[in-house]
């Protein structure tokens, strides 16, 4: 299995609170680093999966368990080079 790196920007979330961070962790996002900056909140994932698509789909499902949706997906250029 390969580790895939990507960021999910969270929809309608302006700040990463301790409560939200805990909910995400409990929902299965323990392989992500939550953050917020300048009104943008996201989670940088380092998710192991057979494919990038599977990794993204499982991360979206996990944040959904915490009652959150993704506004967009960000994949850095360096991460694309390793796909």
Image: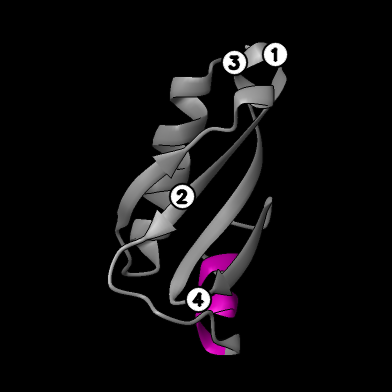
Q: Looking at the image, tell me whether mark 1 or mark 2 is earlier in sequence order.
A: 2
Q: Determine the residue positioned at 68% across, 50% down.
A: 31
Q: Determine the residue positioned at 31% across, 69% down.
A: 67
Asked whether the beta carbons under mark 1 and mark 2 sit within 8 Å of each other, the answer is no
Residue at numbered disc 3: 50
Which label was assigned to residue 8?
2
Mark 1 Cα within 10 Å, few/some/many (few <14, many 20+)?
few
The residue segment tinted magenta is 19-25
User: Dot 1 lies on which element?
Assistant: loop
Q: Looking at the image, tell me whether mark 3 or mark 2 is earlier in sequence order.
A: 2
User: Dot 4 lies on which element?
Assistant: loop
Which label was assigned to residue 82?
1
- Of tags 3 and 1, the one toward the viewer is 1
Q: State how far apart marks 1 and 4 are (Cα).
A: 29 Å
Pinpoint residue 64: horizontal percent, then vertical percent: 33, 58
- Of tags 3 and 4, the one toward the viewer is 4
Q: Looking at the image, tell me whether mark 2 or mark 4 is earlier in sequence order.
A: 2
User: Dot 2 lies on which element?
Assistant: strand
Q: State how far apart marks 3 and 4 are (Cα).
A: 34 Å
Q: Determine the residue positioned at 45% across, 69% down.
A: 40
Residue at numbered disc 4: 38
- Of tags 2 and 4, the one toward the viewer is 4
Give above or below for 78 relative to 39: above
- Considering every residue shown, the one lying at the far front of the view is 38
Magenta stretch holds residue 20? yes
Pinpoint residue 14: horizontal percent, then vertical percent: 40, 79
Pinpoint residue 74: horizontal percent, then vertical percent: 47, 40
For the C terminus, give its image quadrant. Answer: top right
Question: From where the camera sits, is residue 28 visible?
Answer: no
User: Dot 3 lies on which element?
Assistant: loop
Q: Is residue 70 left or right of residue 34?
A: left
């Amino acid at each position: 299995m390969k580790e895939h790196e990507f960021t999910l920007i969270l929809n309608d979330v302006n700040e990463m609170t301790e409560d939200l961070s805990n909910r995400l962790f409990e929902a299965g996002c323990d392989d992500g680093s939550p953050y917020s900056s300048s009104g943008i909140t996201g989670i940088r994932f380092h998710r192991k999966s057979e494919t990038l698509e599977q990794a993204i789909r499982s991360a979206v499902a996990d944040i959904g368990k915490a009652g959150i949706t993704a506004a967009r997906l960000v994949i850095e250029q360096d991460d694309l080079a390793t796909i």
